Image (cartoon, rainbow, N blue to C red):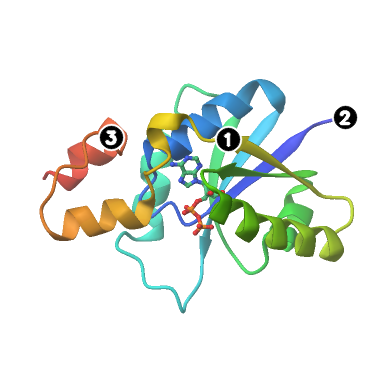
Amino acid sequence: MNKTAIFPGSFDPITLGHVSVIKRAIPLFDRIIVGIGVNSEKRSMFTPEQRKTWIAEIFLNETKVVVEVFSGLTVDFCREKGAGYILRGLRTAADFEFERSIGQVNKKLYPEIDTLFLLTEPEYTPVSSSIVREVLRYGGDVSKMVPKEVLRDIQK
Ligand code: ADP
């Protein structure tokens, strides 16, 4: 059976924490679809196209990893793609509580789906896209938080 996972998120922008989760999940799945969820009510710093371009470039040589933009429910996107798993990362107990409720709701909506969690690597526990955006707004250094492809473009 083809094991496909969706890694859903905003990725606004993708961070080294996200990259670590994706890389560690590669041996576990046949295909990982990084799903950039767009929601008209959520304001973003980077366009979905820009976020997609970065992820595609970072994983250019990983044939199992693809990136797509989607809107609507993650479980509907999973159904459309034939994915049996949702991949998520866990940093803290707060993440766990949040993820537990989404994961359990997703299971109710789509019983065939399971959510797989990977713990963050310790050095990335404090890293989040929202922290990166906040640091960028005030001109701070995000070089330890984002991949070089993102760094290159935001320094332009
Ligand atoms: P969302 O908008 O759904 O919060 P994010 O783009 O912030 O999406 O994150 C997507 C997934 O990546 C979530 O499961 C989140 O917990 C995980 N994640 C975010 N930052 C890190 C990190 N530093 N280490 C590990 N996982 C992370």
Q: Label 3 crowding class (10 Å Cα cut-off): few <14, some 14-19, many 20+?
A: some
Task: Indicate whether 9 appears above or below 90.
Answer: below
Q: Is mark 1 within 8 Å of ligand 1?
A: yes
Closer to the N terminus: mark 1 or mark 3? 1
Please tell me which residue lies in front, 72 or 142: 142
The secondary structure type at the circle numbered 1 is: strand
Name the amino acid type tagged 1.
Answer: Leu
List x then y, in percent, for residue 121: 48, 29
| 55 relative to 68 in the view: left or right | left
Q: Which residue is mark 3?
A: 149
Residue drawn at (34%, 61%) of the image: 47
User: Which of the 4 image quadrants contains residue 12?
Assistant: bottom left
How far apart in space, not on screen, are marks 1 and 3 (Cα)?
Answer: 24 Å
At label 2, the amino acid type is Met
Q: For this rendering, which residue is in front, 59 or 26?
A: 26
Front of the two marks 1 and 3: 1
The circle drawn on residue 119 is: 1
Q: Disc 2 on helix, strand or loop?
A: loop
Looking at the image, which residue is at 62% across and 35% down? 118
The residue under label 2 is 1
Q: Residue 76's x, y, as percent?
A: 74, 62
Q: Secondary structure at mark 3?
A: helix
Question: Reading the chain from its start, which is encountered first: label 1 or label 2?
Answer: 2
Q: How many marks?
A: 3
Sooner in the amino-acid sequence: mark 2 or mark 3 = 2
Q: Quadrant of residue 125?
A: top left
For the residues labelled 1 and 2, the Cα–Cα distance comes to 26 Å
Label 2 environment density (alpha carbons within 10 Å; few <14, some 14–19, many ≥20):
few
Q: Which label is found at residue 74?
A: none
Residue 55 placement (x, y as % from top left): 42, 40
